[in-house]
Image: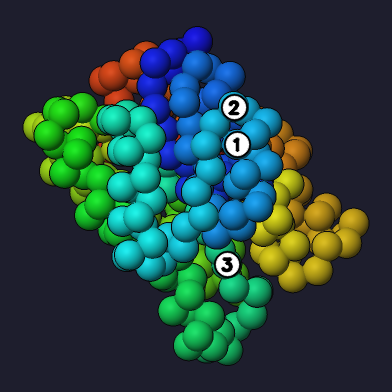
Amino acid sequence: MQLEGKTAIVTGGASGFGEGIARAFASAGAQVMVADIDGDGAKTIARDIGGTAFEVDVSNGASVQALADQALKTFDQLDILVNNAGITHLPQALEDVTEEDFDRVLAVNAKSVYLTARSLVPHFKERQTGAILNVASTAGVSPRPRLNWYNASKGWMITATKAMAVELAPHGVRVNAINPVAGETPLLKSFMGVDTPETRAKFLSTIPLGRFSTPQDMGAAATFLCSDAAAMITGVAMEVDGGRCI
């Protein structure tokens, strides 16, 4: 029960890696608010894990502030924030990505980190404690062709993690990231463009351990980094990637 007595928000918690993290946190003893743009999906996961749900658009400041207000009303205090919500554009030449898709990727993958920080860092500072975890990607470390602006958004998130960690350390707030490789999530088909045995084999050939990341892998890593066992760890972007970035 590594997170016994802790409270947490997990954005994008209705599916994929976010669901895995929410389930792992609950199993480790935390009270979890599952936050997702899919409100019904968030309610389903929250019921399963004995948590609460909130429908949020992480790219919208008012929506994020409403999430923060509801979390503090529900829990009284917040210990952990997981910025997991993310999207991608379809694989294509970098100059062919539409401006609309570019703006959407940066709003969900990058601006959201700013918005949650704006709404919740003052609370963490006041308490002089807290853990923030950003779910980045191996794409921010070792980019794949034709996912250019998604890669860039995750590189931004890794740099933001390190910058936040340095600035917030004097306030007792730790900030880390995890870098998954492609996994069995709703985004997998978008990364590949088309989901066929051939494209899966091509992706898997780049992962030394020979399999995709799973929500359970992310849940285990996130639980450790957000627990007191990682009290001396901040500013880390941990690769949970089966050796992909070696």
Q: Nearer the viewer, residue 169 or 59?
A: 59
In the rendered image, which residue does mark 2 sit on?
50
Q: For the view shown, which residue lies furthest in the right direction?
A: 197
Give the CA distance from mark 3 to mark 2: 30 Å
Report crowding for label 1: few under 14, some 14 to 19, many 20 or more residues within 10 A (C-alpha). Answer: many
Q: Tell whether 185 sits left or right of 63.
A: right
Residue 173: image quadrant is top left
Indicate which disc residue 88 carries. 3
- Residue at 65% over, 34% down: 47
Q: Amino acid at mark 2?
A: Gly
- Secondary structure under the numbered disc 3 in the rendered image: loop
Q: Earlier in the sequence, mark 3 or mark 2?
A: 2
Q: Amino acid at mark 1?
A: Ala
Is 150 drawn above or below residue 207 in the view shown?
Answer: below
Q: How many marks?
A: 3
Work out whether 142 lies above or below 170: below
- Answer whether labels 3 and 2 touch (C-beta < 8 Å): no
Distance from the alpha carbon under mark 2 to that under mark 1: 6 Å
The residue singled out by tag 1 in the image is 46
Element assignment for label 1: helix
Q: In the rendered image, is residue 113 in sight? A: no
- Which quarter of the image is occupied by the C terminus? top right
Mark toward the start of the polypeptide (3 vs 1):
1
Badge 2, how many Cα within 10 Å: few under 14, some, many 20+?
some
Q: Amino acid at mark 3?
A: Thr
> Extreme front residue here?
73
Report x, y in % for residue 10: 48, 41
| Residue 5 falls left or right of residue 28 | left
Q: Nearer the viewer, residue 206 or 25?
A: 25
